Amino acid sequence: MFTGLIREIANVKRYSNNILTINSSYKANIGDSIAINGVCLTVIKVNSDGFNLELADETRSIIDESKIRGRVHLEPAMQLSDRFEGHVVQGHIDCIGVVESIKSLSNGVDYIISVEDKYISYIIPKGSITIDGVSLTVNDVYDDSFRLTIIPHTLKETLIKDYIVGTKINIETDLFARYIEHILKNRSTKKGLSWDEVDNIHAIY
């Protein structure tokens, strides 16, 4: 589990044969879960200047290759002893969004992000969303897009400041919205909730 608070801006050293080599000051251990631009990956080798991660075919089929090049957001998995900030992030990418417009404000920048229509139901006004691993709050939701307002501190500390119109981004929608939508969708074919569903909901809280 992650929080969507970026620990470091790391660099992709190499990507070949499903193996992503990261240059980073973070001291990882083999088996650690680390989110790279919001994608949860497993450390398979530790190097003197970083570590190697492996991408599954399923992951590669969802993300855009631009997300595993150049500078990237890095967040190690949350530990039980950590202070819980941000929001609940799994590191499971739902879809790729595209920056449609950017508008500077007096104290921040508005970004309009488009997504496929089928994912809009998981994006909630004033709810949480993760873009490239960064925990953010949704301002408005439209038919096939949503609006974010990014404050100066977040712009300074993340790669969002480098986005331009047309930039593709990894999106993880709100965990609670996905659970609720799944339960409601299947309610017509089931009599109440199963114990597994009850346990899943209980685990969220």
Image (spheres, rainbow, N blue to C red):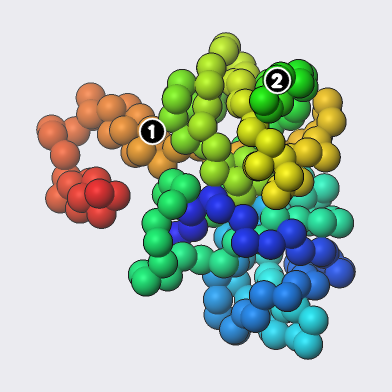
Q: Kindly identify the residue that appears in the image at 59 percent across and 84 percent down.
A: 29
Dividing the image into 4 quarters, which one contains the N terminus? bottom left
> Residue 62 has which mark?
none
Eyeballing the image, is 110 above or below 168? above
Front-most of 124 and 57?
124
Mark 2 packing: few (<14 Cα in 10 Å), some, or many (20+)? few
Is any part of residue 52 visible from this angle?
Answer: no
Left or right of 10 on screen, residue 95:
left
Q: Residue furthest front?
A: 106
Q: Is residue 124 above or below residue 159?
A: above
Question: Total of numbered circles in the picture?
Answer: 2
Give coordinates of residue 9: x percent, y percent.
Answer: 74, 59
Secondary structure category for the residue under label 2:
loop
**Dot 1, crowdedness within 10 Å: few (<14), some or many (≥20)?**
some
**On the image, numbered disc 1 is attached to which residue?**
177
Looking at the image, can residue 49 be seen?
Answer: yes
Task: Say whether disc 2 or disc 1 marks the residue closer to the N-terminus.
Answer: 2
**Residue denoted by label 2:** 106
Residue at 41%, 67% in the rendered image: 82
- The percent coordinates of residue 93 (x first, y second) are 58, 46
Between the C-alphas of marks 2 and 1, the distance is 32 Å
Residue 22 horizontal side relative to residue 184, left or right: right
Q: Amino acid at mark 2?
A: Ser
Is residue 100 found left or right of 145 in the rendered image?
right
Q: Amino acid at mark 1?
A: Ala
Query: In terms of secondary structure, where does tag 1 sit?
Result: helix
Q: Residue at x 82, y 64 (%)?
A: 12
Residue at 48 percent across and 53 percent down: it is 3
Q: Is residue 173 left or right of residue 153?
A: left
Quarter of the view holding residue 185: top left
Relative image position of residue 88 (x, y in whole percent): 42, 49
Pick the residue in front: 115 or 138: 138
